[in-house]
Amino acid sequence: MAGQQVVTMKRVMASGVFDILHTGHIHYLCEARKLGDELVVVVATDRTVRKRKHEPITPENMRLELVRALKPVDRAVLGKEGDMFKVVSEIAPDIIALGYDQMFDEKELRSQLAERGMNIQVVRLGHYEDDLDGTRKIIRRIIEWHKDKADTEGAMQ
């Protein structure tokens, strides 16, 4: 049709564990959202978390619900077991946003996407510096707090 302009939406995909939500997650998702018109977040399954990181503190369905409720997130889905490119294919993003500390080699990821015929831009986002910007930092702080409290209570007896 003459005179009509076609509007193309840019879909951004982000992924993560999101075990204990913190400001680092919020920064990552806000920055990812700025890259396009729609942000789809893939939340790692419990099984994937166990395999790659640690025993999850919160179950996958709870983590998925929390991520879905976040303002920058348009849609959140649970990851798939096995081939991670299956979920990428289903989401069909224009851009994959990687967090500063995610264990993906950008060149290798680009190469694997190209091998599968997926023309997707890969962007590594910057680090957000905050006192408690990581799950492990929060866990350490809780352990320290608990230990200090136990030491104080023990000294009072």
Image (cartoon, rainbow, N blue to C red):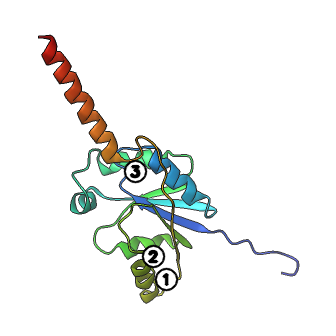
Residue lying farthest right?
Answer: 3
Report whether residue 73 is seen: no
Q: Is residue 11 above or below residue 73?
A: below
Camera-nearest label, 1 or 3: 1
Q: Secondary structure at mark 3?
A: helix
Which label sits on residue 118? 1
Sort mark 1 into few (<14), some (14-19) or many (20+) by Cα contacts within 10 Å: some
Q: Earlier in the sequence, mark 2 or mark 1?
A: 2
Q: Which element carries disc 2, helix, strand or loop?
A: helix
Please tell me which residue is depicted at 53% across the width and 78% down the height of the picture: 120
Query: Is residue 66 placed above or below 43 in the rendered structure?
Result: above
The mark that comes first in sequence, 1 or 3, is 3
Instruction: Please name the amino acid that badge 3 sits on.
Output: Leu
Quarter where residue 4 is shown: bottom right
Judged from the image, the secondary structure of the residue bearing numbered disc 1 is loop
From mark 1 to mark 3, how far is it between C-alphas? 26 Å
Marks 2,3: beta carbons within 8 A: no
Q: Mark 3 — residue?
A: 64
Q: Position of residue 62 (x, y in %)?
A: 35, 45
Please give the name of the residue rendered at 52% of the width and 50% of the height, measured from the top-left corner: 27
Q: Is residue 114 above or below residue 155?
A: below
Does residue 87 appear to the left or right of 141 in the view shown?
A: right
Labels 2 and 1 touching (C-beta < 8 A): yes
Residues under labels 2 and 1: Cα distance?
8 Å
Residue 149 seen:
yes
Kind of residue indicated by mark 2: Ser
Is 100 or 81 nearer to us in this picture? 100
Check disc 2 and report the residue beneath it.
Answer: 89
